[in-house]
Image (cartoon, rainbow, N blue to C red):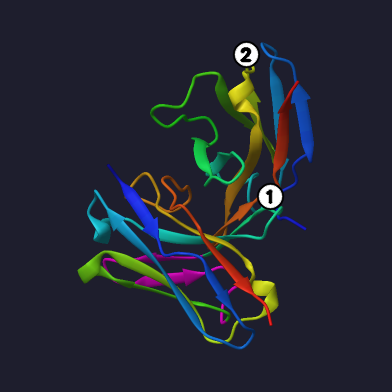
Amino acid sequence: EVQLVQSGAEVKKPGESLKISCKGSGYTFTKYWIGWVRQIPGKGLELMGIIYPGDSDTRYSPSFQGQVTISADKSINTAYLQWNSLKASDSAMYYCARPPFDNGWYWFDPWGQGTLVTVSS
Amino acid sequence: QSALTQPASVSGSPGQSITISCTGTSSDVGVYNYVSWYQQHPGKAPKLMIYDVTNRPSGVSNRFSGSKSGNTASLTISGLQAEDEADYYCSSKRSSTVVFGGGTKLTVL
């Protein structure tokens, strides 16, 4: 069974750094893109960026370029989403998701269970 | 403001059919056939229901169908069931990214 398991909820202060993770299992990790999607409570979905763990090809959506860093460690089948200096506006649920096919990244399924990030002083 | 426009809410009675629209532009929905629909129940992760405008992933009920005309895509759910009550999001490829709609809350009366 294909699964994406994310790290647990985080509570941080503004200005702090954070790295959350997404571990893939049940498939060849290096052959599928992984995307990170933000969902502000009560709001819609936003694709932040995607990474191809096979060669670390990473693409950011324009709104998130320079705001976060996406990486992957293929030796442990894990993708990461990182902030250097959090803001209150980064408070949201963050999902990782994988395309159902290995020939693109325009659709996502399955999804991880989500990591809730709360940034508050 | 979301990149794709969806109605905030729709409703229907059990057994009825409903359609949710998703309006984009000639830079996304109008030019690519990479339109997808997701179902999200409260507190859960989204689930892919339709991809490439009309295709259903394995395991998704054939009560769900998708279509597209010009810059507008649509999701139709026939034979509404109580379990269909959820938020629905459309998405489309746009240049080097994917954009989503703001979501539609489906209420089964």
Is A38 located above or below residue A58 in the figure? above
Q: Within the magenta stretch, is there residue A57?
A: yes
Q: Where is residue A58 in the image (x, y as percent from the top left)?
A: 41, 71
User: Which residue is located at x 31 percent, y 66 percent?
Assistant: A78
Q: Answer yes or no: is residue B50 visible.
A: no
Asked whether the residues under marks 2 and 1 belong to the same chain, the reply is yes
| Subunit bearing disc 2 | B
Mark identifier at residue B79 = 2
Residue B57 appears left or right of B63: left
Kindly identify which residue carries mark 1.
B26
User: Which residue is located at x 27 percent, y 42 percent?
Assistant: A1
Q: Where is residue A83 in the image (x, y as percent from the top left)?
A: 52, 80
Helix, strand or loop for disc 1: loop
Q: Within 10 Å of the Cα at label 1, are there few (<14), some (14-19), or many (20+) other Cα atoms?
A: few
Per the rendered image, the range of residues in magenta is: A49-66
- Give the CA distance from mark 2 to mark 1: 32 Å
User: Which residue is located at x 58 percent, y 29 percent?
Assistant: B66
Along the line of sight, which residue is nearer the eye, A9 or A112?
A: A9
Helix, strand or loop for disc 2: loop
Along the line of sight, which residue is nearer the eye, A111 or A99?
A: A111
Q: How many labels does the image show?
A: 2
Residue A73 appears left or right of A10: left
